[in-house]
Structures are given as structure tokens and as C-alpha cells.
Amino acid sequence: MRLARRADRERSGQDDGRGISTETGSQLVSVTLPSVDADITAKVELLMRGDKTARGYDSRIKEVRANYSDELRNILVVGSDGTFAEDSQPLARMNVSCIAKTETSSGRGTSGGGGRVALDFFFGEKTPEFFAKEAARQAILQLDAREAPAGDMEVVLGPGWPGVLLHEAVVMGWKPISIAKRRRRLPD
């Protein structure tokens, strides 16, 4: 209520001498030009570069999906004492997914990145070509992958921590059950 009354006084020109002050501390994220303000053709160009690189990696790459998303969140916090603080948080991400196929198998790969960055981030070390090559590499690698073995297997533990971890995973898992059933040892 106090904040609403103060806002009414400000609008009507009545000032109680305290006024509304702003606190704009240092921003956690410093981006000169958020990607939401960038031209759409620059964003489309990033996607086209990723698509071209992935398809050129290997002829077995049959499908490529590249996506780009960005947003800009503006935050305003107003305190009941009339102070307020604001922050601007840009977010941009690019992702490339590939499907590779042969007559007998198929593989999928994906790679992407971004964060609280501007569009120029994708022109540095982590380019669309970087993400596309990694996604294509994963998809091609899966073509020759074999099924993971299943069933009973021997487990060999070295001295020290492996035994402690096994104890914590197996024995400590039975402890609440043993306490609830008033047992002093593990079941057979």
C-alpha cells in the first residue's frame, strides 16, 4: 500500500521530500548488443552455416536440424521504501542435431552452446561450424557402435575408495530397512 500511495503522490506532483531513488548496481551480465536486437538475417546465416557444415562432413549425414533461440529478460525490483533496482539478462543459444544413416544402422548426434552472450559469441571459438562438426562426428561414430554388453559380469575393485563406495551403495541402502524391521544384519 505504501508503494501505491507514493506512486500516486509522484503522479500528482505531491512530493513528501523523500522521492523515489534508484539503485542500479553493477550488472552481472555485460552485453553491448543483445542478440534480440540483431538483424534476423544474421541469425539465419548462422543456421545456414551450421547446416552446410554438417551436411558436408560426411555423405551419410541424411538430416540436419539447426536451431537458434534468444531472449532478453528485463527485471525491475521495487522496494517498499521507494528504491528500485533493474537488470537486463540476455540469453542466446544455438544447437545442431544430425542423423546419419546407412542400410543397416543409424546414428544421432547433437551439439550446441550459448548462454548470457551476444550474437558475436557465435563468431568466436564456438562457431556454427564447431557445433555442426561435433554433432556430425557423434552421428557418424554411432553408425559403427555395437550394443553394450549386458548380463552378469565380474566387478574388480581396487583398494581404498571403491570399497567405501560399494559399502555406501549396498550396505547403507539396507540400513533403514534393517532398522525398520529390527534386524541386526543384512538379509541373506
Image: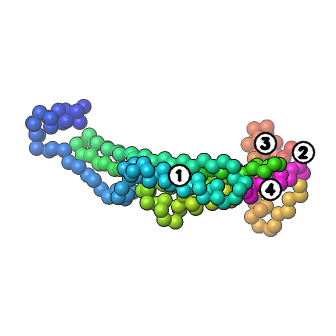
* Inter-mark Cα distance, 1 to 3: 58 Å
Q: Nearer the viewer, residue 164 or 14?
A: 14
Residue at image mark 1:
47
Residue depicted at x 53% and y 61%: 127
Q: Splitting the image into 4 quarters, where does residue 135 fall?
A: bottom right
Q: Residues within 10 Å of mark 1 (few under 14, many from 20)?
A: many
Q: Position of residue 155 (x, y in %)?
A: 86, 59
Amino acid type assigned to the residue bearing label 4 in the image: Ala
Does the magenta run of residues contain 83? no
> Where is mark 2, residue-wise?
188
Q: Element at badge 1?
A: helix
Which residue lies at the image location 22% right of the left edge and 33% below the top edge? 4
CA gap, disc 4 to disc 1? 29 Å
Location of residue 188 with respect to 161 vertically, above or below = above
Kindly indicate whether the residue at mark 4 contacts the one at mark 3 (C-beta within 8 angstroms). no
Q: Name the element at disc 4.
A: loop
Q: Nearer the observer, disc 3 or disc 2?
A: 2
Mark 3 and mark 2: Cα distance apart in space: 12 Å
Residue 90 visible within the image: no
Which span is picked out in magenta?
140-152
Q: As drawn, is 173 to the left or to the right of 121?
A: right
Q: Give the label on residue 145, or none.
A: 4
Figure label count:
4
Query: Residue shown at 42%/56% (left/top)?
Result: 118
Task: State the residue in front, 147 or 172.
Answer: 147
Nearest to N terminus: mark 2 or mark 4:
4
Image quarter for residue 164? bottom right
The earlier-in-sequence mark between 2 and 1 is: 1
Q: CA distance from mark 2 to mark 1?
A: 59 Å
For badge 1, the amino acid type reads Leu
Give the mark nearest the N terminus, 3 or 4: 4
Which-is-in-front pick, marks 4 and 1?
Answer: 1
